[in-house]
Image (cartoon, rainbow, N blue to C red):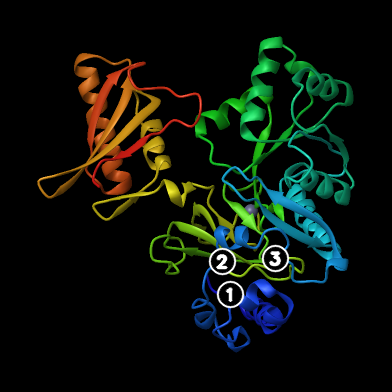
Amino acid sequence: MHMNDETLALVRTLLSSIKEKSPFYAAKYADFDPAEVASQADFERLPFTTKEDLRAAYPLGLAAVPASEIVRIHSSSGTTGVPVIIPYTAKDVDDWSLMFARCYEMSGITRDDRIHITPGYGLWTAGIGFQLGAERMGAMTIPMGPGNTDKQLQMMMDLGSTVLGATSSYALLLAETIAERGIRDKIKLRKGVIGSERWGEKMRRRIASELGVDLHDIYGLTEIYGPGIGINCEASEAMHIWDDFLYCEIINPETGEVLPNGESGELVITTLVKEGAPLVRYRTHDLTRFVVGACPCGASYPRIERLIGRSDDMVKVKGVNIFPAHIEEALAATTHASSEYQVMIDHLNGKDILTVFFETAAVGDERLRAEKELHGIVRAKLSLSVVAKAVDLGDLPRSEKKTKRIFDNRY
Ligand code: ZN
């Protein structure tokens, strides 16, 4: 994406003192002087900052201000070993609340709304982010935190909650429980603000229809403030990103090269005004693309597509990058396929062969047509010829945790 003069000025200000302020960047940039960066091209030669770098800085090695200026820390979940700790100054917290309030406003939420917050509070950035933004805007917050569905629904009815902040899985659980208990007419929700993990279209439709709400995808990650750095407006499914606080790039996750506007790749973010722990070219591993052109809502903030996955989930077949989301989209577009599938990639006689097994209730000729249909859709969408194999419903393995969908047998 083109770096405008304003952004370049902010980047240059950031880089002019980063070695002085941040021992982390002083070490990372030991061999060169980032103050010499004078153009977008110079900037794009700077090394990336990675999650591993951040882990190695545990506990407070990322701090770029004296400890007396740090007013709080947050931490990303340490599911894979050492957690990452992000220190915030008072200005960082203030900026974050401004961005989050802007998210609510962008999604048509006002100070007259009653915002029911179900993500967790504590080290995690989610609950407190929803809270900060709502208080800044002046809406009533109902800081529930997670769990205890009975109490959630009781409060929702008694207080007349109009906005639900939740993860997609908890929103689905609430929606199902509301449907089961037949209490939909007692629920006043009109909007759902849902954390932007990747979630399928079928799930989205169920949550929206069973809760009777408009859904908005809110984006963010603990390393970069937390949720609230972008959201989709009422006119578009793509998420606007607050480019007065952040500079975004889309890179090829394999080569690190910056991709032309509109191409899919990994989102890389630079914080422009963050004090506690500024980050330069941070690799998010989230896959998306810039949406080119003006948004019908009139806002000039750039937009990124809903996340299509994590760069760790990508496989390359015959020069085409494939993500689980691509296969899911193709299946959703077919008449007879269920949501369950498995992809096998093999190398035979010098050629890569990609086979998609999918479940269907169709039999006989109808099953052959279903296979042909899926083959055609994948070819049209990805310019890739695949082998489509229908199997009976329930034939593919199920898992309670994350089901492994793609098996790469080439190496
Ligand atoms: Zn818009």
Can residue 14 be seen here? The reply is yes
Marks 1 and 2 close (CB-CB < 8 Å)? yes
Nearer to the camera, 221 or 401: 401
- Where residue 343 appears, as percent x and y from the top left, is 31, 35
Callout in the foreground (2, 3): 3
Circle 1 Cα neighbour tier, 10 Å, few/some/many (<14 / 14–19 / ≥20): some
Q: Amino acid at mark 2?
A: Thr
Q: Amino acid at mark 3?
A: Gly
Dot 3 or dot 1: first in sequence order is 1
Ligand 1 closer than 8 Å to label 3 CB:
no
* Disc 2 target residue: 49
- Where residue 211 appears, as percent x and y from the top left, is 68, 25
Q: Secondary structure at mark 3?
A: loop
Can residue 208 be seen here? The reply is no
Circle 3 Cα neighbour tier, 10 Å, few/some/many (<14 / 14–19 / ≥20): some
* Disc 3 target residue: 61
Q: CA distance from mark 1 to mark 2?
A: 9 Å
Q: Secondary structure at mark 2?
A: loop
- Where residue 366 appears, as percent x and y from the top left, is 24, 18
Q: CA distance from mark 2 to mark 3?
A: 14 Å
Q: Residue at x 22, y 25 (%)?
A: 369
